[in-house]
Image (cartoon, rainbow, N blue to C red):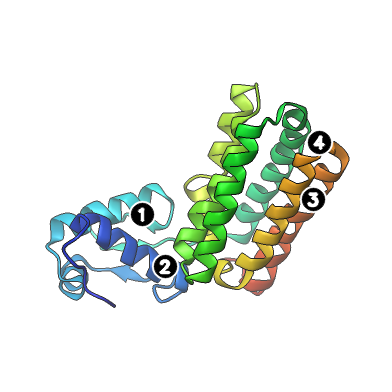
Amino acid sequence: MKKVINTASLAEQAYALLKKGIVSGELAPEKELPEVKLAEDLGVSRTPLREAIQRLAMEGLVSLNKGKPATVATFTKEDSLEFIELRQLLEIYNIERIIQVADSSFIEKLEVNLDDQLKAIANDDYPGFTDADRQFHLILASQNPNSQIQNLIRQMNTGVNRAFLILSNTMSVSAKDAFEEHKRILGAIKVKDAVLAKKEMTEHLRNVEKRFLYYSKGDESV
């Protein structure tokens, strides 16, 4: 694993390197993250390393274990499928609510986000892609006048509710497909075609589920 360099904060760099290791599968689910060895490997003290691990724990990517080293998080297939089902219910309905009030500023935000997704793919920056992917769905939710629906969609795209997609290592192999699906969703929003937009979002979330099932390879937990 690479050592950090003195440009961003040490905690930020340690976080980025550990997240990259988790997204790539180099740090597999349930792998222990012993502080002393990890700090030495990364070339940092234990204080910034602990900050990085705490941040990853908040995102659902690391499990903190009292009296023992933290571990890369794991998940059950059943829980993961339930999260996807909730996203389908919320986000397909959300498209129907927002499409007629989608203005030029909102569309521009989505276009900028798609550019970020494409740049991340071009640079093999899959942690960056996962962040942009999440943000795409949050931008869509931000247009909904119902703040409770906004909050629920945010919850379903935050922490452990989304972490299983990263932990199942689907992003590096499905990013291009996901980007194209996002682009079709935006295309339907631009022409205010509610039927097409719902169809594209339905297809996208079904594909998220299919990709997850394929790459989790039928295991009960990963």
* Distance in Å between CA atoms under marks 1 and 3: 32 Å
Which of the numbered marks, if any, corresponds to residue 200?
3
Label 4 amino acid? Lys
Residue drawn at (29%, 56%), measured in percent from left and top?
A: 53
Q: Please state the horizontal and vertical placement of residue 145, each as a whole percent of the image.
A: 65, 21
Outermost residue, right side: 195
Indicate the secondary structure of the residue bearing disc 2.
helix
Judge from the rendering whether residue 91 lies leftward or rightward of residue 136; answer left or right: right
Indicate the secondary structure of the residue bearing disc 3.
helix
Q: In this view, does 115 lie above or below 38?
A: above
Number of the front mark, 3 or 4: 4
* Distance in Å between CA atoms under marks 2 and 4: 38 Å
- Residue carrying label 1: 56
Q: Is residue 120 above or below residue 107?
A: below
Label 3 amino acid? Glu
Judge from the rendering whether residue 128 lies leftward or rightward of residue 14; answer left or right: right
- Residue carrying label 4: 192
Reading the chain from its start, which is encountered first: label 2 or label 3? 2
Q: Is the C terminus in the top left, top right, bottom left or bottom right quadrant?
A: bottom right
Quarter of image, res 5: bottom left
Q: Please state the horizontal and vertical placement of residue 57, each as a whole percent of the image.
A: 36, 52
Asked whether the beta carbons under mark 2 and mark 3 sit within 8 Å of each other, the answer is: no
* Distance in Å between CA atoms under marks 2 and 1: 10 Å
